[in-house]
Image (spheres, coloured by chain):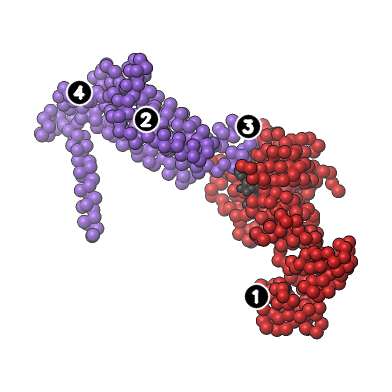
Amino acid sequence: MPKELIHLNNLSKSFDGQMVLDELNLKIHENEFVTLLGPSGCGKTTTLRILGGFAVPDAGQVIFDGKDITHVPPNLRPLNTVFQKYALFTHMTIAENIAFGLKIKKKSKAYIQDKIKYALKLVNLEGYGNRMPDSLSGGQQQRIAIARAIVNEPKVLLLDEPLGALDLKLRQEMQYELIRMKNELGITFVYVTHDQEEALTMSDTIVVMNQGYIQQIGSPESIYNEPENAFVADFIGDSNIIPATMVEDKLVSILGFRFPCVDTGFGRNRPVDVVIRPEDVELVAPSEGTLQGVVSHLIFKGVHYEMEVMAGGFEWLVHSTVLHPVGEEVGIRVDPFNIQIMNKPESEDEEAVAIDI
Amino acid sequence: MTNALKKIYIGLIIFFLYAPIGTLMVLSFNASKARTKWGGFTFKWYAALFENEEILSALFNTMLIALLSALAATLIGTVACIAMTGMKRRTKSIMMGITNIPMLNAEIVTGISLMLLYISLGIKFGIGTILLSHITFNIPYVILSVMPRMKQLNPSTYEAALDLGASHTTAFFKVVLPDLTPGILSGFLMAFTMSLDDFIITHFTKGIGVDTLSTKIYTEVKKGIKPEMYALSTIIFVTVLALLLLVNLSPEKKEQK
Ligand SMILES: Nc1ncnc2c1ncn2[C@@H]1O[C@H](COP(=O)(O)OP(=O)(O)OP(=O)(O)O)[C@@H](O)[C@H]1O
Ligand SMILES: [Mg+2]
């Protein structure tokens, strides 16, 4: 594991008596791409602002490289931020924007010129130095904002939904560019988004947040395949979240039907939630299924068909490349490896699932 | 309505609006002193104007007061705008209301109130009192033209400057102020014009022996109308018109860049 760079230690913050962050703990390592993911209002921006020095936590510390920087002003922190709304200086040319931080640090003219050229090349906007920010498209402005931050060679780059305003195609392009930059520059990225696909594509580590609490920290694979609670499962992509009972180790009763699974250690006859991803539900002939049902909805989604199957009193969401027309009787089967058992969430999380964003 | 009718209609409006001023301007070039007879084209009234010591000193006073009061009001108004952005919404709208009152208030009321205030405070009337009064009524105009700019300001640009290593002062002067400049500039021009243009408030706060152009014209006209006054009025009108055009055009030009 690379060196630990940032430690957010028990951060708490409230605005007007409303708790926004509640004893948040997070460690970020060198050259890691960490994404804060969560629904609107869960405290992502607040966390980032505390990290950048634009907000002071009510309690807790920000430790950077072993030093407490909780009260260090933003201009003295070795971090740079890319703001959600670009925040380019509209009365300066692109080159002047990029040079801003370097001029303040009193770098030589030649050094600044070199850096501008290098940064424009890095973001694929060579030759744009003399343009005004207004004359650039949204995606280009965002890339300039990134260039402006990167020339300062920060140890950490903070990005607050930098791609939020871009269209799908441009967003995907920028995702690849950001990953490339991270690999080329060796900078630690702390990235904020509420788009789960973006988080899965780009991150080394995803931090799923809800209502000021961290729900789960893990790699994209572990977050997707082994969500720890119903909130995470529901937030990361479509899924079937079904109340169930753990009969014994490796055997779970879902809707009264017994499914073999691989999880152990939940005890006997314990109520749990199971998560089954729609692509993991296999539709087979009725006689071969663990339980039987009828297809009730069918939508063509491009890569696959999305179907809903009424079985055992539950509407199962199913993704499959094989078409089963509405009204067809089918059997449902699930591979034991694809059944993810979760503890019942605490009441607070339950509330959050009900809001469902 | 047909196009021709429309044009006639607009023409009539402009005629009635500008006929009096037009007459004045024509008369200022009239060689004959009589108001009803054209005695040939001349610049002599303008020449006479610039030989008249009293008028020149009034012109100097007017310019000095306009410039100083506009500068002071611009400074105070801009700082007030910055302070107001930091306020809570309610306090802010109350403050905005308070600053707007002098503008809506009848000028004669403002003039008399200021006069009474100076008397009760024992301040000697003169250029100083005129200046103070002009600063007072100019501040709302500055606030009114800077505030919209302030609202458009993207608050993250200030934070972005800090983020890139700028101190609070540097961030303000390098990033925030340039964004406000068009508003500040048009506020300044507006204030300058208003000061140049003012008669009533100046009349009540000027004291004896001190005159600006507008009060000078008033005293001269009381003695009997002289063609020099036509020339002077024409100059004031043209200056104010030019300034107003400048105020109205300058923000747009900046925008289109
Ligand atoms: N300066 C502030 N004053 C008062 N309340 C605030 C302030 N900043 C944030 N909040 C509140 O804190 C909560 C969390 O806000 P935050 O901006 O961190 O959310 P977020 O996760 O970034 O959401 P989004 O995805 O919508 O950007 C919200 O309920 C918000 O209203
Ligand atoms: Mg946010």
Would you call the spot at circle 3 few (<14 residues within 10 Å), some (14-19), or many (20 or more)? Answer: some
Q: Which residue position holds label 3?
A: B167
Q: Chain of mark 2?
A: B
Residue that badge 2 annotates: B137
Q: Residue at x 59, y 48 (%)?
A: A85
Q: Earlier in the sequence, mark 3 or mark 2?
A: 2
Q: Residues within 10 Å of mark 1 (few under 14, many from 20)?
A: few
| Above or below, A330 relative to B82 | below
Which subunit holds the residue at mark 4?
B
Q: What is the distance, in whole Å, between disc 3 and disc 2 at their CAs?
A: 35 Å
Apparent side of residue A272 relative to residue B144 in the rendered image (left or right): right
- Of A349 and B101, which appears nearest the observer? A349
Asked if residue A121 lies left or right of residue B61, the reply is right
Where does residue A139 sit, x and y in percent of width and height?
61, 53
Which residue, given by chain and number where applicable, does mark 4 sit on?
B220
Q: Which residue is mark 1?
A: A299
Relative to A80, residue B188 above or below = above
**Left or right side of A334 for B89:** left
* Amino acid residing under circle 3: Ser
Which of the two discs, 4 and 3, labels the residue nearer the N terminus? 3
